[in-house]
Amino acid sequence: MLAKRKKKIKKGGFNFKKFFGILLFACIFIFLIYSAINLFIKRMELQKELDVLNAEEEELLKQRESLKFNLGETYSEAYLEKVAREDLNFKKPGEKVYVIKKEGEEIEESTETNENTTFIDKIQSFLRSFNK
């Protein structure tokens, strides 16, 4: 008959394998919590930036719609006449222009170089200058 072997049981000794296993698990757990907190903070910062960019996009879309509306107006005769009168200081043949001068302000007189060009030709040449 064979004798049964008894397992040796250590009593009261320090178990290094168990200690390092727990220590390793604790380090990994702390690292994961630290990473999760950093990701949360980064996500909050990016969310704020996204909100700012969405607001800016909305503002730019409104501005785009306004510019599209204004672009439609630029081809009308009334708008061309307004630009020619206010910005280019043109006048229709036979009209007289009166300027009210404020105190201390000097008036610049515009001289027309070519009297043969029509009012519409001047406006068209002005608008062509933007296309170049």
Image (cartoon, rainbow, N blue to C red):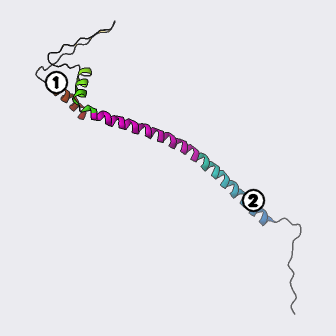
Residue 119 numbered mark, or none: 1
Does residue 51 show up magenta in the picture? yes
Depth order, front residue of 113/61:
61
Q: Is residue 63 left or right of residue 76?
A: right
Residue under numbered circle 2 = 23
Residue segment shown in magenta: 43-72
Can residue 132 be seen here? The reply is no
Q: Nearer the viewer, mark 1 or mark 2?
A: 1
The answer to whether 22 is drawn above or below residue 99 in the figure is: below
**Which quadrant holds the C terminus?**
top left
Residue 67: x percent and y percent? 34, 35
- Identified by mark 2, the residue type is Leu
Residue 57: x percent and y percent? 44, 40
Task: Specify which label sits upstream in the sequence, 1 or 2.
Answer: 2
The answer to whether 26 is drawn above or below residue 121 in the figure is: below
**Which residue is depicted at the point 68% across and 58% down?**
28
Residue 77: x percent and y percent? 21, 29
Q: Quadrant of residue 63?
A: top left
Residue 101: x percent and y percent? 30, 9
Q: Is residue 16 left or right of residue 131?
A: right
